[in-house]
Image: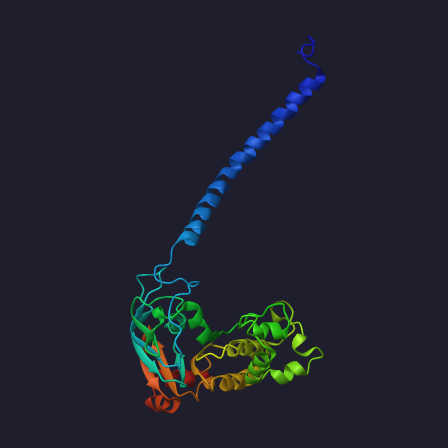
Amino acid sequence: MMLSNEITPFDYLRVVLLTQFGANFISQLIASVSDLTKARVAAENILGVINESAVDMNNLSDEGLRPKINGRLMLKNVEFRYPSRPILPVLRNLTFKVRPGESVAIVGPSGSGKSSVFALLQRMYTPTSGEVLIDNYNVKSINPAYLRRVVVSVGQEPTLFSFTLRENIGYGLPEDEATEEKIIKAAKIANIHDFIVSLPQGYDTEVGEFGAQLSGGQKQRIAIARAMIREPRILLLDEATAALDTASEKAVQAALESASKNCTSIHIAHRLSSIRTVDKIIVLVDGEIAEQGTHQELMEEKGLYYEMNQSEI
């Protein structure tokens, strides 16, 4: 066609380039079809979760009771299965009581249901059957936001923000409630006040991303202060000293003992040396209570708790 002058060389080049671009586009589109299909399925799953209505709980609801809590706990014939594994019971007909101000430790092998008890007390989940009671109120009847203000948890890996020490401690309360007096009081309970005031900028010291400027024990005591500023009635301590060295563990253990004086405390522990002074120890195995009593009583029984202690020596 060029020889007969029906098209110019420029027209020929344009057709060739457009053909190549079109072929490349189609090949890329075909290659992306599988990715688009996967993305559509993933989006449908995510939107399904977002749009799913809560069966019996709305965390943002203003409804529910806000009773004065003294700290009495009771699990009554509780059975629990995680929604993702409905065939496998995690807790089986579990019943125990905790008096106001009492300190209780829950121990047992991995997978025995210790963390599930904490999840139920904070109403992260609802029992399959049975009741979780706080001062004779079923936790289902208590306002979720209020419940998580009076029932406070301190975990093994504290989350600190890239703010000042003051802001990290005050984060446990709404901004208008986190007064300087409350922040300092909470820091003293957590045995971290003296360290903070020894810093050049005191409470205005930046902790860095994820608390990078602090040691493990210092971060844990900041987390305890954040919990105590809420003045909780029930304190849940989930292996709070498990990741610390011996020196840091002693400092944090002293802070925990101070924090537990004015509230009910429940400990999950793998280091049994940290719970010998609690009022009662509950040994869970496969979601059921195998033993319970004081450290001395359980050691004299020479059962599972005794064997667990012997393995630490």
Side (left or right) of 9 relative to 170: right
Q: Is residue 221 visible?
A: yes
Name the quadrant containing residue 201: bottom right
Instruction: Give above or below for 293 relative to 115.
Output: below
Q: Is residue 241 visible?
A: no
Name the quadrant containing residue 301: bottom left
Side (left or right) of 56 relative to 272: left
Q: Say how many tags the image has.
A: 0
Q: Tell me the residue at 46%/41% (across/down).
A: 37
Q: How is the image coloured?
A: rainbow
Q: Position of residue 287 (x, y in %)?
A: 33, 73
Q: Position of residue 149 (x, y in %)?
A: 46, 73
Nearer the observer, 187 or 80: 187
Q: Position of residue 35 (x, y in %)?
A: 50, 42
Instruction: Give above or below for 251 relative to 226.
Output: below
Question: Hey, which residue is sitting farthest top in the picture?
Answer: 4
Instruction: Give above or below for 260 relative to 46.
Output: below
Side (left or right) of 91 relative to 248: left
Q: Tell me the residue at 54%/70% (across/down).
A: 174
Q: Position of residue 241 (x, y in %)?
A: 51, 79
Name the quadrant containing residue 22: top right
Nearer the observer, 54 or 254: 54
Instruction: Give above or below for 28 relative to 12.
Output: below
The N terminus sits in image quarter: top right
Nearer the observer, 100 or 27: 100
